[in-house]
Image (cartoon, rainbow, N blue to C red):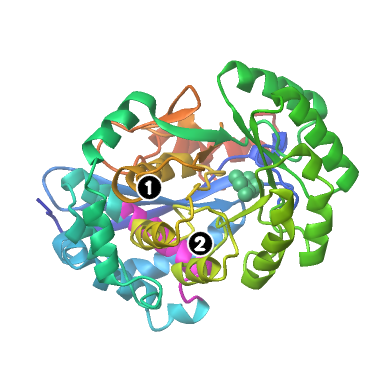
Amino acid sequence: MVRGRVIALSVTDVRFPTSSDQHGSDAMHTDPDYSAAYVVIETDATDGLKGYGLTFTLGKGTEVVVCAVKALAVHIVDREFEEIVGDFRRFYRQLTSDGQLRWIGPEKGVVHLATAAILNAVWDLWAKQEGKDPQKLLSCIDFRYITDALTEEEAYDMLKHGKLGQKEREEQMLKNGYPAYTTSCAWLGYSDQQLKELCVKALKDGWTRFKVKVGADLPDDIRRCKLVREMIGPDNLLMLDANQRWDVQEAIDWVSKLAEFKPLWIEEPTSPDDILGHATISKALAPLGIGIATGEQCHNRVMFKQFLQAKALHYLQIDSCRLGSVNENLSVLLMAKKFQIPVCPHAGGVGLCELVQHLILFDYISVSASLENRMCEYVDHLHEHFKYPVTIKKAAYMPPQDAGYSTEMKEESVRQHRFPDGGIWQKLISGQNV
Ligand SMILES: C[C@H](O)[C@@H](O)CC(=O)C(=O)O
Ligand SMILES: [Mg+2]
């Protein structure tokens, strides 16, 4: 049963100095410190349950998102939790339509990341309090701006249809898990030697799908792709990620030169906002058998709708913190189902694997009912800071067993990594080795 009045929201700027070892580096983010605006909501219910939420950020960006979370907090503090989730669509709209804050969005950028952090905490708490049925899930979705692509009635039919075979799919997931690919072997800043060692280890651990960062320098890309293809052999899957580095024609020319390494997709070849540009690249690369993947910086359901309508992507990469939490991700999963495009979530960041596993398991069990051309990203960093970290077995995500959204961080990790006064940052700032 839903219970309690929200009495407090706290937000912390948590940063991990990942840039010092080039973890997470790509052609556009050369010094990424994986970070999070970390939200905790408390109610006055006697159960003592709290909701934990976050949005993924990089370093300095976190302080801006923290400000936005504080500005939005007024919408949630001092409200009955039942009032919030009882009409979740209305609450979602209230957050995304704040008369003053929407001007610096709407539903995009910093305010939308802050919205995601807050709503992820709401979902975490709600999931701990009670289960959900299709009707309830639908009532969380804001269909505004997407009814020309997906109506509420269609969504309801999909969820009802998704009930068929659900039990079997649940059992299958519990037994085998959801297939994953790894990005952790080939961040852009890693040396060739590192690449080799990480590929050897990943192959030994059973990985069969690998993503390589590209886009900064063509001869480097050719050398690194050759190396990785040699390491993983002809049958394993190889994906490329340019993180928005190129213009449209440049993307076509550059990727054509990497075609010999047989990549399954090129991810974010150009500006994440350029839907027609992606469609052009998609057409040009189709004869080479290379698909387009994008979504980690696709800021809302409207963008995804247009990507789908314009046939501008082949692999749709939802992000648990970029979109407005589970609410908006649900609408995108349902649109992907309608347009028959596989969802392959983005998870390169702190906490993203923990969150997104819930979305993709839900997608398989209740929406897509298919594993064809589908896999979820995995990066091998910072899981030790979470109270309920992901479990990977034989390169697959095993379904989480604890109630909630797996968003809670260990208290000690938050204390140590709080910026700028946490122990790790104090040592770095004062020039000591950590
Ligand atoms: C800055 C992040 O590490 C980014 O490179 C992640 C990404 O593009 C991915 O995981 O895909
Ligand atoms: Mg990417």
Specify start and end residues of the magenta stretch as a single range. 105-121
Q: Is residue 239 above or below residue 255?
A: above
Give the labeled residue for mark 2. Answer: 65
Farthest residue to the front: give it. Answer: 287
x then y, percent, for residue 428:
66, 38
Specify which label sits upstream in the sequence, 2 or 1: 2
Farthest residue to the top: give it. Answer: 204
x then y, percent, for residue 199:
69, 24
At x 70% / y 43%, what residue is drawn? 25
x then y, percent, for residue 333:
39, 56
Q: Is residue 115 covered in magenta?
A: yes
x then y, percent, for residue 156:
24, 63
Give the labeled residue for mark 1. Answer: 359
Q: Helix, strand or loop at disc 1?
A: helix
Using the numbered discs, state the Cα–Cα distance from disc 2 to disc 1 in whole angstroms.
23 Å
Crowdedness of circle 2 by 10 Å Cα count: few (<14), some, many (20+)?
A: many
Q: Is residue 63 above or below residue 361?
A: below
At x 57% / y 25%, what residue is drawn? 207
- Confirm whether residue 356 shows in the render: yes
Q: Is residue 295 covered in magenta?
A: no
